[in-house]
Image (spheres, helix red, strand yellow):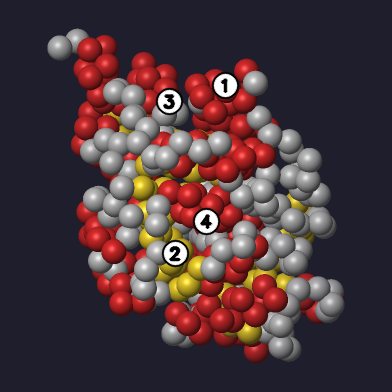
Amino acid sequence: MSYADFLAHKNRPSTATGPTITESDVNPVLHPWQRHIVAWAVHVQRAALWADTGLGKTMMQLEWAHQSGNTALIVAPLAVCHQTVREASKLGYTAAYVRDDSDITGHGLWVTNYENVPNIDPETIDTVVLDESSILKQSDGKTRTMLIDHFSEVPARLACSATPAPNDPEELTNQAEFLGRMQRNHMLAAYFVHDQINAGGYRLKGHAKDPMIKWMATWAVALRRPSDIGGDDDGYNLPGLNIQSHLIPVPIQQEGQLFATDIGGVSGRAKVRKETMADRVAKTAELVAAEPDEPWLIWCGLNAEADAITAAIPGAVNVHGSLTPEEKAELLMQFADGTIRVLVTKPSIASMGMNWQHCARMIFCGLSDSYEAYYQCIRRCYRYGQSRVVDVHIVLAEIESQIAHNVANKERKASEITVALTAEMANHHHIATERNAA
């Protein structure tokens, strides 16, 4: 079999098997372009929605779930579950949080967190949404396999993510397999070549890009702004993002050097972070004190940093790992409601899904190499509905500036990838084509 024949065999168009509805059948609370996406995804039945933060992903997935079946389950990070229940009321629907399938009492919208999935009998539902579906890339192999296998017989499936990375074989193949579009090993064989130099050990075959995008367009949509799908960008042009770095001098001398010039490996980074913690915490507290009437969101990487910052800033609340999931969720919602003015937490706890447009001041007291975590943290505040310029302060030791440069490089590369992907999807996706033709 030639390679072209092989691709043609693997690249079978997805057959739409869901209900056929029109935009007028979709809840009028949604924007016209959101209604169009929902109607398309309901018809496709097993679809991926990769919409940037602030584009109404939660509202679209709720409406999709309402339209796609009788008993729908939305799976999300715990802190996002209660927010999802709130959002349902804006559409005029009632959604309820459940811990196991005994709580599912019949038709309706049900919401649970990823940790509870094994407690839900998939035969009790006919529709499932994975919110923040990038968990299929981030989670360990056991969790990923469980999610794919657990919901494999549910007729209607939707995978939603605000940080799509379709160039990432790990995320692409796992989401495709969750949706029942193609098994992971088949997709790797069709479109990728093994290459240990690249992350994940695979890279996209140059001549396979166009066939893969055409195939993906039958079951996935990606967009950064409404105009990517033929909508109106009015109101979605954010007021601005002001990123400021504050570099703390490092009072550490490395052996054989007069000044510290290299952060070294993991142990070197840990030493620098520990030795500069007091100064970084002091700078963080100073920034917050300078604007005492503003809500502040402070991201930390270490427990000691979070404890010190909380002690240094009057009224600050630390949402940390030893709290119960319910306690975390309650405190995060209190920040959203304005009851808490200064929230201190880690990206691993609160960087996904939360809507904190009321806050326009943020501090990273230290930084990791993860661009995805950095992006998600910023987008908790810098998103649709934000009416002010968001000030982001990055407080680092001078020697850690290389980390900031590394994240900035990843940001530029990710932006290039996103632009290229969106252009391809606009060219190949029949939603945009139909809309433009109309």
Q: Where does residue 16 sit, x and y in percent of width and height?
A: 37, 33
Q: Position of residue 102 (x, y in %)?
A: 31, 77
Residue 181 at x, y percent in the picture: 30, 36
Q: Which amino acid does the dot numbered 2 rest on? A: Gly
How many neighbours does mark 4 have within 10 angstroms: few (below 14), some (14-19), or many (20 or more)?
A: many
Considering only order in the chain, which callout, 4 or 3, is on the residue closer to the N terminus? 4
Q: Which residue is mark 4?
A: 62
Residue that appears at 31% across and 26% down: 191
Determine the secondary structure under disc 1.
helix
* Residue at horizontal 55 percent and vertical 36 percent from the top: 22
Query: Could you tell which of marks 1 and 4 lies nearer the N-terminus?
Result: 4
What's the distance in space between the residues labelled 1 and 4, CA to CA? 25 Å
Foreground mark, 3 or 2, reads: 2
Give how far apart the Cα atoms at labels 1 and 3 are. 15 Å
- Which mark, by number, is residue 433? 1
Quadrant holding the C terminus: top right
Q: Please name the residue that numbered disc 2 is placed on.
A: 108
Location of residue 228 by image quarter: top right
- In the displayed structure, 83 sits above or below 54; it is below
Q: Are marks 1 and 2 in contact (CB under 8 Å)?
A: no
